[in-house]
Image (tube, rainbow, N blue to C red):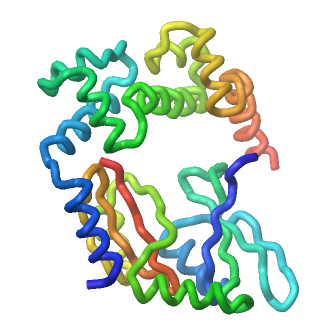
Amino acid sequence: MKVTLISIPVRDQEKALKFYTEKLGFLKKKDVPLEGGNRWLTLVSAEWQDGPELLLEPAPNHFEPCKVFQDALMEAGFPYTQFDVDNVDADYDRLIELGVEFSVKPTKMGTVKFAVFNDTCGNNIQIVETL
Amino acid sequence: MTFYQTEIERIRKICYSNDSQIETVIATRNYIDNNYDKDLKLDFLSHIRFTSKYHLLRLFKRYYGQTPRQYLTDKRIEKSKENLINGMTVTETCFAVGFESLGSFSKLFKTKTGKSPSVFQKEQLSRSKLDLEF
């Protein structure tokens, strides 16, 4: 068995695609039309294109408990997904420039530095740099 | 302050309050990052940080979740992939990232990545060639 896919629940796949590619810099990898306007939509890191794919899935629109869970995480400020970065401060500055909202500014904790931002699709996302 | 931030502060006090320990393991990791290609020994690392070998080993594992040896191995494999992609031969790569035997390098590389170094390199090179052709 191999780990190749990480899913992120989103309310609006098109909006998520724009945010994740235009602001975060991911690349679109697969876009398969499904029923009811839903898509199997995956992205990869620009710097690791054969790495795991990120699935932007519209689960909150079709499965109420997913929506409830996502809302609860958002309200509590919890990031359920995190990405590795080389330099949290540099990405923080870059994303602030692009109008991304952070709930946690770059913060050191033990052997990591992290920050948390709002992906505008219902999720808090954490970026982490290992020190 | 969100619930998450409150939790982070609570956990920080419990798990990450010893600044000198944290400083020691971060410096050790940086040292490995900058010297992965050399014959690294834990004795030497612990001398730099004025601590005992076993203490340093425990600390590193406590904060990074893996031993310095495991971290060094992962680092060397990561670097060897870069070298192979950049066209370095398997033998050159093996010694350039600090391994001493070609046999153990190839075996380890296959265990960690699922492919031997030569197969990995062939695939990478044919991939970039394919990109040009299609």
In the displayed structure, A117 sits above or below B50; it is: below
Q: Nearer the viewer, residue A100 or B114?
A: B114
Measured as percent of width and height from the top left, residue B12 is found at 24, 61
Q: Is residue B1 left or right of residue A66?
A: left
Query: Which quadrant of the view contains residue B113?
Result: top right
* Direction right: furthest residue: A35
Return the residue nearer the eye: A118 or A87. A118
Looking at this rendering, what residue extends furthest in the front direction?
B14
Quadrant housing residue B25: top left
Instruction: State whether residue A14 appears in this view.
Output: no
Query: Residue B68 at what x, y percent from top left?
Result: 37, 29
What residue lies at 46% left-to-right and 21% top-to-bottom? Answer: B97
* Residue B4 to residue B12: above or below: below
B3 left or right of B122 in image: left
For image coordinates 43% across by 81% down, the residue present is A118
Left or right of residue B99, residue B41 in this image: left
Q: Nearer the viewer, residue A114 or B119?
A: A114
- The image shows residue A84 at horizontal and vertical percentages of 44, 56
Picture residue at 15% right of the left edge, 27% below the top: B49
Q: Is residue B56 visible?
A: yes
**A96 horizontally vs A37: left or right:** left
Question: Considering only vertical position in the picture, is A86 above or below A89?
Answer: above
What residue sits 54% from the left and 7% below the top? Answer: B101
Image position, residue A60 (x, y; %): 66, 88
